[in-house]
Image (cartoon, grey):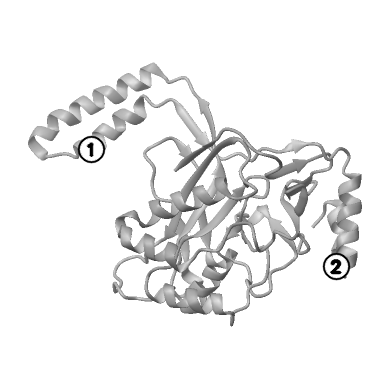
Amino acid sequence: MELQVRKGCGPAMEMLSGHNGRMALQINSQTLFWATMLKDHCGVWLVFNAEHPAQELLLPAITSADVERAKRAGESQWLSGWCRYFARQLMEAPTPLLPPRRWLLRPMEAVKPQAPYALNQTVPFGQWRFTTPASSANISVPWALYSEDFPDLQSPEIVRFVDWWWGGHLLLARYPVDLHSGRVKWWRKKSREGALPPVLVWFIAGLASFVILDGHDRLQAAIAEGIQPQFLVLSELGEQRWEPDEQARERVLRSLAIQQEKCKKTGANIDAMNQSLLNLYDTRYLYAPTHSRAILGDGKNWERELTAYLQRNHLEQHLAAILAREE
């Protein structure tokens, strides 16, 4: 689902950047996290602001009525219905989170084990893997997530090093979850019923990772039950155009013409041929950037703010490496 946010009403969810690889994500003009890229560009330090008043309240809580409404729509409308639900929540919240821009919501679903396997077979947590479905468009957002990149939801790290050398694409939690809370128990029940809404995450290109926007309790419930959840990935959407190679296009057209003749005898896949024709004339290239406003200057204010925060939380042991942009 593509979202077109045409105008905003005050500060929203905004990435700021400056010299020395400094970054900060702000919501309502308050920093949600600080980040800085390593000098050798092999990773990034990330510090979540546990003191931000909106850490646990970015979106309204999903209600029982919301879940029942999605169930009545049927399984075929499950993901599309939740896409529309989160789109409304993101854009219609009292303080809208999305600045004016093009956005994309794509599902990321569990990969089934390789055959042979039993339909009711439980996949161990260590083998969980999630990917986006195949797309007919030239879209470069092939999300993938592995269980080894999940955070400890009950005790997430405030200071985290995201190692790009080993692929990055971590799943990052913003606050701790109480395994024994009533909310988690309720979601565990919904998970067993097959009615667990997707976990909403935001892919931030500058971190090469996913940040959980909504669904900490749902994800914890799914892990506790050993039932793989679904994800919806929010990302910005960029578009570029490319000039086609006419000679290559002619070769493909001749090949498709030959296949069409064979189709009359062998029953070849017409749908696949039609999709090849569509792709042949689609000169768009879609990708997922993350825009930022370069207003942090030399980063001195960023450093003072971060230093004070780490000192208040007795995490000074990380400060030297973060400021030096070293692992």
The earlier-in-sequence mark between 1 and 2 is 1
* Tag 2 secondary structure: loop
From this view, report whether residue 36 is shown above or below residue 123. above
Depth check: 143 or 107 in front?
107
- The picture places residue 220, in percent across and down from the top left corner, at 55, 73
Depth check: 179 or 171 in front?
179
Determine the image quadrant of residue 264: top left
From this view, report whether residue 178 is shown above or below residue 50. below
- The picture places residue 42, in percent across and down from the top left corner, at 72, 50
Depth check: 79 or 132 in front?
79
Q: What residue appears at the point 29 percent right and 69 percent down from the top-left corner?
A: 116
Kind of residue at badge 1: Asp
- The picture places residue 312, in percent across and down from the top left corner, at 89, 67
Q: In this image, 138 relative to 121: left or right?
A: right
Kind of residue at badge 2: Leu
Residue under numbered circle 1: 271
Depth check: 194 or 258 in front?
194
Q: What residue appears at the point 66 percent right and 53 percent down from the top-left corner?
A: 165
Determine the image quadrant of residue 100: top right
- The picture places residue 325, in percent across and down from the top left corner, at 83, 51
The crowd level at tag 2 (other Cα within 10 Å; few <14, some 14-19, many 20+) is few
Q: In this image, 183 relative to 19: left or right?
A: left
Q: In this image, 252 relative to 300: left or right?
A: left
Q: Is residue 8 visible?
A: yes
Toward the left, the furthest residue is 265
Q: Are marks 1 and 2 in contact (CB under 8 Å)?
A: no
Residue under numbered circle 2: 315
In the rendered image, the quadrant that contains the N terminus is top left
